[in-house]
Amino acid sequence: MEIILKDKIRDAIKFLYNSNLTDDLIQLQETRKDFKGDFTLIVFPLLRFSKNTPEQTGENIGNYLVSNFKAVTGYNVIKGFLNLEISDEWWVDYFMRLSAEKNLFKNCQSADPWVVLVEYSSPNTNKPLHLGHIRNNLLGFSLYRILSACGHKVIKTNIVNDRGIHICKSMLAWQKYGEGETPQSSGIKGDHLVGKYYVRFEQELKTQVDDLISTGMNEADARNAAPLMQEAREMLLRWEAGETELVDLWKKMNSWVYDGFDETYKMLGVDFDKIYYESDTYIIGRNIVLSALQNNLLYRNNDSSIWADLTSEGLDQKLLLRSDGTAVYMTQDLGTAVARYNDFGFDKTIYVVGNEQNYHFQVLKSLLKKMGYKFADGLIHFSYGMVELPEGRMKSREGTIVDADDLIKEMKDTARIVSLELGKLSEYNEEEKEDIFRKIGLGALKYFILKVDPRKNMTFNPVESIDFNGNTGPFIQYTYARIKSVFRKADQMGIIHDNSVITQAKPGKKEIELIKLLRKFSNTVAEAAYGYSPAVVANYCYELAREYNQFYHDFSILGEENEALRNFRLALSGVASEVLASGMWLLGIEMPERM
RNA sequence: GGUUCCGUAGCUCAGUUGGAUAGAGCAACAGCCUUCUAAGCUGUGGGUCGCGCGUUCGAGUCGCGCCGGAAUCACCA
């Protein structure tokens, strides 16, 4: 519509003022609800052609359009705004085309599809996933869905940080205090079991550190000097040397963790096409650094550590290999990036990583450029804000970490309690009910996280956030279930849904409003893909669900006497449910047929 | 101190490439279930969009300067 309308407006200016308009001067937008009309042309930019008042210019253009374009039935001018009224027939016709369209994402197909690699999750193998990981996983998975919907080829990857001192701490504590405990013997989920020994290590270390401090040592030195810490370091060296027994233990404990993660990922509904391990990529990274050193892109310090000088780009000196030749975080990420490019040859690679690492990715990008990797231009750090609790940041020392598994279970339990109170599901068996509770509980959690702008830090109140009313996932799911229920009822009543009579319907204001909202959907997805923002999709779904609920209350659908209008409303409901389901699909949220 | 990000109602958050009178939900109060799902709907109250200056016909949105908060600036990852 806009395109045709813009053409007509261009004609109008040509005819009235004998001037040719460039596209950016035609500012056309949807008319605000409180004004009469469907589309609004902002006439201020056109005054230079008309050399007239805004009001008169608007009048002239409006007049021209009404007499030369059938779909425009009227207009009004308020200050510099020309509100154009589009005929109901046009809207009904538009809706017919929309409801016939099976692919709701058709309008946002990218003309130039990318191969795009999305990295998300990136766990450490020494403890279970927590609330921060949940935001990461949900964002990453939703980005995958959004970009896929727009026609890009997306590869989901996960980089597992499976090496380093942290995993040695868990291994050491398990050796010392574990007495052979396994997930099977204890019934504890593997990642939680390994996390338990990581915590145990820190506890034991603390008593040693406290003892040393009481002898007059300062804290930093005490941590270094503590026997446990020294043992852990020594273990890391033995691991890097490839000591068989130790590598076997490492493999065993990591496999416990992966089993645990798999369960959590499955509950969250996320998955990966390819998993990378830093225990592999750090070696690649080291080779890259060494060859860059040979090409004089890096320099070696007196103590034989290797550095990059990025001061010319406003960055700092960056360490790439320690004096003992071992790799640092950046070394691994260089290796991972190159390995991935060799595997997939991507156009873009999106790192879903918290904003605490903004500097790291700035450095990574300029390092890759410096080393001559052209793909560095397609490197995007999707930087998201921290999840905080009402009392501030999550702190492991204070035991305020919100565990992912616990949280998921809590959401499901709350969904169960609320559902049973409302008592709508009495006719379903236990299995069916559990499936619905799961969808609702996870829907609430996912929506709560995804509806906020990823860039911003967000507050998660474990008590208040579990709300199923208002701008929440369950509200949107409820709207969907309600529409499904209308169709079930229609079937029972033998009402046959026939689109062919719709063109005879005389729609009211509300029906047109709904069509306009449905129309915005594909624009929204394109915008979301461009801005990499699930939040845009989420808030749009809410807007539509809210609008539909008002519609639902204002109108009788099945009870409507007029057949054409009844079919129209049914069709509107049907498309609304599809759009809601599609939108929530982009967020990775499942929709229950009833709740 | 350098860099980056954030600041909108009591709370949690929206706010389209700069557009008209800044919106939801929660919380508070008042209504609506013999009618297609009340996880809903309607209404009331609640704002110096951190502060100032600038650009513009027009600024919550763009620029500059302050104020406040967060992150980061490791031979940690």
Image (cartoon, rainbow, N blue to C red):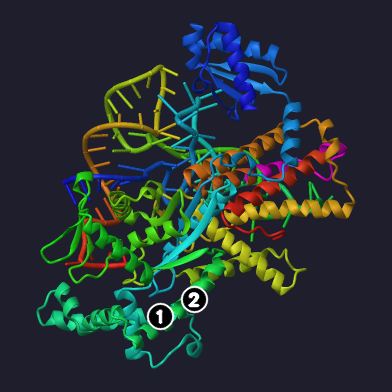
A319 sits to left or right of A197: left
- Residue in the picture at 17% in, 84% down: A211
Give the residues drawn in magenta, as a range.
A546-565
| Kind of residue indicated by mark 1 | Val
Q: Does A209 appear above or below A420?
A: below
CA distance separating discs 1 and 2: 10 Å
Q: Is residue A374 above or below residue B16?
A: below
Q: Is residue A550 magenta?
A: yes
Q: Is residue A41 visible?
A: yes
Residue placed under numbered mark 2 in the picture: A260
When asked about the image quadrant of residue A133, the answer is bottom left
Q: Residue drawn 63% across and 52% down?
A: A476
| Residue pointed to by mark 1 | A194
Residue A114 placement (x, y as % from top left): 51, 47
Query: In what element is the residue under mark 2?
Result: helix
Q: Are marks 1 and 2 in contact (CB under 8 Å)?
A: yes
Question: Please, is residue A68 above or below residue B61 in the view?
Answer: above
Residue A490 in percent (x, y) is at 84, 51
Of A438 and A140, nearer the camera is A140
Which one is nearer the viewer's eye here, A370 or A108?
A370
Q: Nearer the viewer, residue A527 or A188?
A: A527
Q: Nearer the viewer, residue A430 or A63?
A: A63
Main SS of residues in magenta: helix
Few, some or many C-alpha atoms within 10 Å of disc 1 (few <14, some 14-19, many ≥20)?
many
Question: Mark 2 belongs to which subunit?
Answer: A
Tell me if residue A199 can be seen: no
Q: In the rendered structure, which amino acid carries the disc numbered 2?
A: Gly
Q: Position of residue A505 (x, y in %)?
A: 82, 32
| Vertical side of A204 occupied by A447: above or below | above
Magenta span includes A7: no
Q: Residue at x 34, y 70 (%)?
A: A396
In terms of secondary structure, where does tag 1 sit? helix
